[in-house]
């Protein structure tokens, strides 16, 4: 790609970052948070068919916001990466850290390559440890930087506002119902403090968990609308 | 970094991982790391003695599910290679696979098949139909034809719960990948002739799960009685047949306590009548 004018590298990177951020901000948000038995993913998603949250491997889950075709491509690459490792070595050798690194390299390369537009996506790779202390939540941004989140991660348009609401009442040992209600309350408060929260019904939510108490080796489980409805209707909010 | 072979497990995601493709793991494996795919190998001579052989697998349906059981013996020629080999596996949450034939190849095929089913389910967001799974397995067996002709044939028995039909179903295969649906019960492996004969007399369509489990253990006992390559229940070492079922709730394995109890009952009854329960002549 040739350019007739000189553009300072700092400016070029800033333009690319702005472009990616704008794309990401258009979408609805996703909250990933720890709860008593593992890690919970709550996404506002009106589509039943196009998933924002997905299973990657036995103990690894994936959540994304931004441009669907881009994160879907990354999701499939992640499943291929995990299954390839699990088949070539052993299921125990598939780790969230390995996957997060693979994504970071790819996103970083695309972001800094002049020939390609940056991916307009933000991802979370969450891994369930053997004990709650070993749970990992990795957050990856469009430029390939990786953040290791201790308790929760929020991605999407109004991430800052939502983080504030969720973090204020979050604890790592919340029961599942409370964690889901808290995340939904956060998603509904995206208009900002002082504004009335929206109402988000079970049909507009995509919720899944990595559940340590599940007896099968695959710990990922979706919570269908039938399970969510009574949960959302439950008693008072925590905190 | 190379885009194939060991390079695929490096830190990054090579271009092949991002390319559009099907939901099949085995196709992806053949394209990206062909050296790991079972079909890429052939030998030149008779290789029968290279791998231990797994022997008898039996399956039968009951209202609400299907039961698959296998003995625990693997042989190499006249030698017992292993006394406690596992030959029945869960293929996924609703299906089971029992393997007879070259054990090394069979276990690898099971692993590939399990990964294949899970891979499809994760990418598509929905599991394959039971017929789809059975056909996929047929294709894998067909790819092994080269090795089968050198004496390393794998003959699985596939069974599972079909949510579309609301019943358990059984599929058998031949070495060329032919797929045959079996009704009620079936058996494969060296002792299968005796096991099937036994099940013919013991099976009745209305049987509940427990009677079904007892019937398959009886059938394995009869197979072990007449086939030297099939192992009977080993009461001294406490090695019992593996019995697994697939029902609407998913796949589960009968606990050792349950199988040991059934095996003890069967052996006790055979103390009285070594040939097993008598069937009426008419």
Image (cartoon, rainbow, N blue to C red):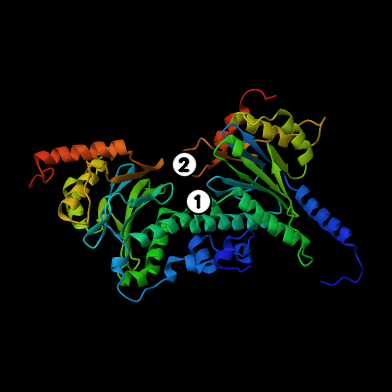
User: Which residue is pictured at 21% across the width and 38% down the height?
Assistant: B264
| Percent position of residue B31, x then y | 53, 68
Point out the frontmost of discs 2 and 1. Answer: 1
The mark tally for this picture is 2
Q: Label for residue A91? A: 1
Secondary structure beneath disc 2? loop
Name the subunit of mark 1: A
User: Which residue is pictured at 92% across the width and 69% down the height?
Assistant: A5
User: Which residue is pictured at 69% across the width and 58% down the height?
Assistant: A105
Q: Give left or right: position of B167 versus A102.
A: left
Residue B18 sits above or below residue A239 on the image: below
Secondary structure beneath disc 1? helix
Q: Residues within 10 Å of mark 1 (few under 14, many from 20)?
A: some
In the image, A191 versus B74, the foreground residue is: B74
Could you tell me if residue A215 is visible in this image? yes
Residue B29 sits above or below residue B182 on the image: below
Question: Mark 2 — residue?
Answer: A216
Residue reaching furthest to the right? A5
Viewport quadrant of the N terminus of chain A? bottom right
Residue A202 sits above or below residue B35 on the image: above
| Percent position of residue B280, x then y | 9, 44
Q: Are marks 2 and 1 on the same chain?
A: yes
| Percent position of residue A133, x then y | 61, 36
In the image, B250 versus A14, the foreground residue is: A14
Tell me which corner region of the image, top left, top right, bottom left or bottom right, holds residue A59: top right
| Percent position of residue A203, x then y | 62, 39
Could you tell me if residue B126 is visible in this image? no
Q: Earlier in the sequence, mark 2 or mark 1?
A: 1
């Amino acid at each position: 790609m040739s350019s007739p004018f000189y553009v300072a590298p700092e400016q070029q990177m800033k333009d690319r970052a702005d472009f990616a951020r704008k794309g990401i901000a258009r979408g609805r948000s996703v909250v990933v948070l720890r709860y008593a038995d593992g890690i919970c993913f709550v996404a506002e998603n009106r589509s039943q068919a196009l998933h924002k949250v997905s299973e990657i491997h036995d103990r690894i889950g994936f959540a994304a916001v931004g441009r669907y075709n881009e994160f879907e491509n990354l999701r499939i690459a992640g499943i291929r990466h995990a299954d390839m490792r699990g088949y070539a070595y052993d299921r125990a050798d598939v780790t969230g850290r390995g996957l997060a690194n693979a994504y970071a390299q790819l996103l970083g390369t695309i972001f800094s390559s002049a020939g390609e537009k940056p991916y307009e996506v933000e991802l979370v790779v969450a891994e369930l440890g053997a004990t709650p202390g070993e749970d990992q939540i990795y957050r990856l941004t469009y430029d390939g930087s990786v953040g290791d989140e201790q308790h929760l991660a929020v991605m999407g348009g109004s991430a800052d506002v939502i983080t504030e609401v969720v973090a204020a009442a979050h604890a790592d040992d919340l029961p599942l119902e409370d964690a889901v209600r808290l995340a939904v309350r956060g998603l509904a408060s995206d208009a900002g403090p002082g504004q009335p929260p929206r109402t988000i019904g079970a049909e507009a939510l995509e919720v899944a968990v990595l559940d340590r108490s599940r007896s099968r080796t695959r710990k990922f489980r979706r919570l269908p609308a039938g399970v969510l409805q009574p949960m959302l209707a439950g008693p008072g909010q925590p905190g | 970094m190379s885009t194939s072979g060991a390079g695929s497990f490096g830190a990054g995601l090579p271009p092949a991982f991002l390319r559009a493709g099907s939901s099949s793991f085995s196709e992806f494996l053949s394209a990206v790391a062909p050296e790991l795919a079972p079909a890429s190998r052939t030998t030149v001579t008779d290789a029968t003695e290279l791998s231990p052989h797994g022997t008898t697998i039996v399956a039968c349906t009951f209202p609400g599910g299907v039961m698959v059981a296998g003995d625990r013996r693997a042989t190499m020629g006249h030698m017992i290679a292993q006394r406690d080999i596992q030959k029945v596996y869960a293929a996924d949450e609703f299906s089971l696979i029992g393997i007879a034939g070259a054990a090394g190849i069979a276990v690898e095929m099971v692993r590939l098949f399990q990964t294949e089913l899970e891979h499809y389910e994760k990418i598509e967001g929905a599991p394959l139909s039971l017929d789809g799974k059975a056909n996929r397995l047929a294709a894998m067996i067909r790819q092994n034809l080269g090795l089968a002709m050198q004496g390393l044939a794998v003959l699985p028995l596939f069974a599972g719960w079909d949510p579309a039909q609301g019943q358990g179903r059984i599929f058998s295969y031949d070495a060329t990948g032919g797929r045959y649906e079996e009704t009620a019960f079936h058996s494969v492996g060296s002792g299968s002739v005796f096991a099937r004969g036994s099940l013919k007399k013991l099976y009745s369509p209305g049987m509940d799960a427990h009677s079904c489990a007892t019937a398959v253990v009886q059938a394995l006992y009869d197979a072990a009685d007449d086939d030297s390559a099939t192992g009977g229940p080993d009461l001294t070492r406490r090695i019992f047949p593996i019995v697994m079922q697939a029902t609407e709730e998913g796949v589960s394995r009968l606990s050792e306590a349950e199988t040991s109890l059934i095996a003890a009952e069967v052996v006790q009854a055979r103390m009285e009548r070594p040939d097993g329960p008598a069937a009426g002549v008419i």
